[in-house]
Amino acid sequence: MLVIRDLMKTYASGVQALKGISLQIQPGMFGLLGPNGAGKTTLMKILATLLQPDSGTAELDDLNLIKARAETRKKLGYLPQDFGLYPTLTAAQMLDYFAKLKGVTGKKERRSLVDALLERVNLSAERNRRLGGFSGGMRQRVGIAQALIGNPQLLIVDEPTAGLDPEERARLHNLLAETTRENTVVLLSTHIVSDVSNLCSHFAVIRRGEIVTATSPETALAGLEGRIWEATLPREQVDGLKASGQIISTQMAGRHTRIRMLSKNGKPAEPFVAVTATLEDHYFIVVNQV
Amino acid sequence: MVTINSLRTFSAIAYNELLLNSKRVAPYVMFIMCGGNALLWWGWGPATGRGWATNSDFFIAGVLPVYSFMTLPLFTALMMADPVIKDFRTGIDPLIFSKPVSRAQYLLGKFCGNYFTLMCGQSAFVLTLFVLQWVSKQGVIVQEAKFFPYLKHFLFFVVISHLVLGAFYFTVGTLTRNAKIVYGLGVAFYPVYITYQVVLLKSLPSPWPTILDPLLMNRRNLHPTSVDVINRLVVVYDANEIINRVVMILLTTICLAILYKRFTTTERSGTVEKFSVLNLSTAAERVYYHESLQATLVDEFDYKAARMLTGVAVPEVVRVNKGIRAGTDKLIAALGVEFSLLRAERSLVVVMPLAIFFSVLEVGFYNIPAAGSHSVAYATNTAKLLLLFLIGIVVFYTGEAMHRDREVKIEPVIWSMPVPNSVLLLSKFLATVVLTFSLMVVVGLIAILIQLVRGHTSVEFSAYLTVYGVVLMPGTVCLAAVIVAASVLLRNKYLVYVGAVGTGAGLFYLYNAGYNHWLYNPLLYNLWRYEDLTGERILAYRLYCFILAAACLAVAHILFERRSR
């Protein structure tokens, strides 16, 4: 289990990125949702031993991730949000190098590992192609393959699906879901709600350096049952609705606006109808709450 | 009709090229090498000992065509090969061509921006000569300081000569979208030009050799009788030389006109050349779909079908991360990768042949006085010249290796691996050391070959081993360690380069001014003779050199932090 207690981080520029984050994460896939600039990447970097927090602790079972950095790296698989690869190396050479750095010394073992990883990320046919010519999705797959080397106990993937096309995203979802082992903690940071609803058994929402909610998708949706209302109205009526409940989202539809509202006290107005809550509703509610 | 707006677009493109070039290594290397070249011509060139003033019109006009031939063609190829290719390679071309930019503005802007950068690099030679008017050295005669001859002859003998060469390389690179072809042409320039001189120009009657020589190496020879006349001589360009320059400008125009006619902005069916591309655009920067659309599509995507693509089990592996053996294995792996990345540096295609060429130039074409043995004379001579190149190579390539991971954005991935800091640092340090040792071996072998061809036998390998092993190798190791430490401390490649160049220039000035001591001259520049290389004192010097290297590496190791931004 990964236990994070009161993690705080303020950058030299004065930006307070984390304001005392505490989380308890069981093995399995855990989603960390939040808007851009919420502090997700800072938290990920701290857990990946790349950034020192000002205070607080993070422990994976009995291992202190903040202090025992060298030990942590032996149990870690990390896919950063923004990363590159050596463009002149081939995919197989790059993975072989990463495997060596992770301590896979046996040549045969390494070879079969690289083959399996390339197969797994569907890059076998490209194994001898230089990485400089890879598309964004292909590079992302090499990134995830390197993170999986050595069956890490803690797998940190920071915004892995950003910018990928639907097929690549689905492939990555499957890959992550299938590689989650019984005793592995997978921490998935994203700002795409469907990543969490598709993959994670639990998730937390982070906003301005603070955890605003930590729950499971089922619990989050159960809490909204019967409280989400939708209607399509002329635009000029939208402002008048603010007193009736919390507006979750609005979407233009011709001269009208499709509006979703949270109302704890039944139908907010005519012609609203009750609709099934989605995780996106939950996300908008917690992120936009004052 | 040329409007103010079209001129603005053109100048914006040209200015952007200057900006891009200011972040490349090549122009700085070129500047330093051209400046160093001028220093050699000034202090150790034909003027010294013959009584020629180093700022006389005769000397300046005489030395510039030779400089233009010997140093510049490879740099012209390097700088002019890929300005347009880079745009296609980085994928910025659709952003540029979707703006109201005409082909002429784009191509001329690119050409002028890069040629101006090239010109700035070339000008280091005349600038250095100009500044050296105020420096005194025994045997060097200087007249009253002047400025105009430097500018005039530089424009006439260097800028126009390389204008046509630059336009040719630029045209070939842009039309083929393959920089390797241009580099090949750059390397082939010397044999082609020499053959052209020997086979064609020498057989033509006057004035054709002058008119048809792009570098104006066949100028009419002036043989004044006295030094006094030479120093007072004002070089006036004759009609043939002016015709030659006009022809060169016309050829440049024709070259660029062909390029303008043939250049298309459309995508090629094949892939654009991708070698040593630092394609830093990340997945996050590529937005293909609106987010809401993306979510919908993913939700509707057939996961069952997609699942078929995966499902291969990743085998369990044994990992060894403790002990000296594990550390050594990782170091060897990292060294292998670092060395292959160094070899992929495009500038090496130019720098290595140039270093080899100049290191063996004297032993190849001049008579080297052999007091004791020919091998000693050959080894000593090549080592002295090679040392200057080694300094440049070590400074710039160690700097590149130390900062590459950050530039390629692979740093967070590597830093999250269970690798000791010592492996990360030593692999980069050793990669440059191996590269320089390889260069020494090649130069040594070529020197031995020349020795055999010229009949200067017998070959004594021990002389080469002693000179290279005692003088060059420890110096290289020490310098590489200093750059590693500086890179860790400063964390900025350009600061390291500026610091290294500044310190180097200062030290060389001190050494040449007579303040030369082994304590601050670990490279032993101008501080050794072959006879000294077997004594106890040299052992102490070299021990000091290694201790300095070890201290620098220790400092780098202590201060190195896996500090994310």
Image: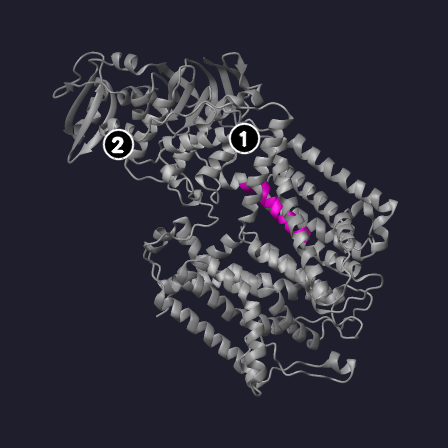
The residue tagged with tag 2: helix, strand or loop?
A: helix
Specify whether B333 is left or right of A125.
right
**Spatial separation of the CA atoms under disc 1 and disc 2:** 40 Å
Density class for disc 2 (Cα within 10 Å; few <14, some 14-19, many ≥20) is few
Specify whether B380 is left or right of B62.
right
Q: Can residue B498 be seen in this view?
A: no
Asked where in the image residue B362 lies, by quadrant, the reply is bottom right
**Extreme-front residue of the structure:** B458
The subunit carrying tag 2 is: B
The residue tagged with tag 1: helix, strand or loop?
A: helix
Front residue of B74/B118: it is B74
Q: Is residue B182 above or below residue A216?
A: below
The residue wearing badge 2 is B292
At label 2, which amino acid type do we have? Answer: Ser
Residue B271 bears which disc, if any?
A: none
Q: Give the range drawn in magenta.
A: B390-404
Residue B144 position in % (x across, y down): 75, 72
The subunit carrying tag 1 is: A
Question: For the stretch drawn in magenta, what is the main secondary structure?
Answer: helix
Front residue of B35/B348: it is B348
Q: Are discs 1 and 2 both within one chain?
A: no
The residue wearing badge 1 is A101
Specify whether B38 is left or right of B182.
right
| Residue visible at 67% across and 30% down in the picture | B558
Residue B263 position in % (x across, y down): 36, 63
Front residue of A275/A137: it is A137
**Extreme-right residue of the structure:** B536
At label 1, which amino acid type do we have? Answer: Leu
